[in-house]
Amino acid sequence: MHCVVYRSSRKADSYLFVEREGDFARVPAELLKLLGALELVMHLQLDLKRRLALSDPAVVRQQLATHGYFLQMPPPVPRPRFS
């Protein structure tokens, strides 16, 4: 499965995956507004052998097929533990 990855200008380390370049028809308008301007990062072939840094490729593929987009957010920052 081919997809296109965009970086958010407003949300640090947030990436929007869509099926085709420039096709945001299935992405909710509220989400697009929240993300701000989107910068094209790369075209990506998502097969099950591909590894992604923060997301499971099978989940990305499923979300693209079902919803038409996948939003990758930065991992949560661990809170300091106090004894």
Image (cartoon, rainbow, N blue to C red):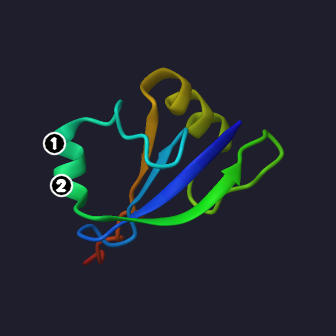
Residue at 64% x, 56% y is 43
Mark number for residue 54?
none
Hey, which quadrant is residue 25 in on the image? top left
Mark number for residue 30?
1
Mark number for residue 34?
2
Q: Residue furthest right?
A: 49
Classify 26 as above or below 8. above
**Residue 11 in the image, given as x and y percentages of width and height:** 27, 67
* Mark 2 and mark 1 residues within 8 Å of each other at the beta carbon: yes
**Residue 62 in the image, given as x and y percentages of width and height:** 57, 28
* Quarter of the figure with the N terminus: top right
Q: Secondary structure at mark 2?
A: helix
* Quarter of the figure with the C terminus: bottom left
Q: Amino acid under label 2?
A: Leu
Hey, which quadrant is residue 38 in on the image? bottom left
> Does 28 sit left or right of 15 as displayed?
left
Q: Residue furthest top?
A: 66
Classify 83 as above or below 33. below
> Does 23 sit left or right of 12 as displayed?
right
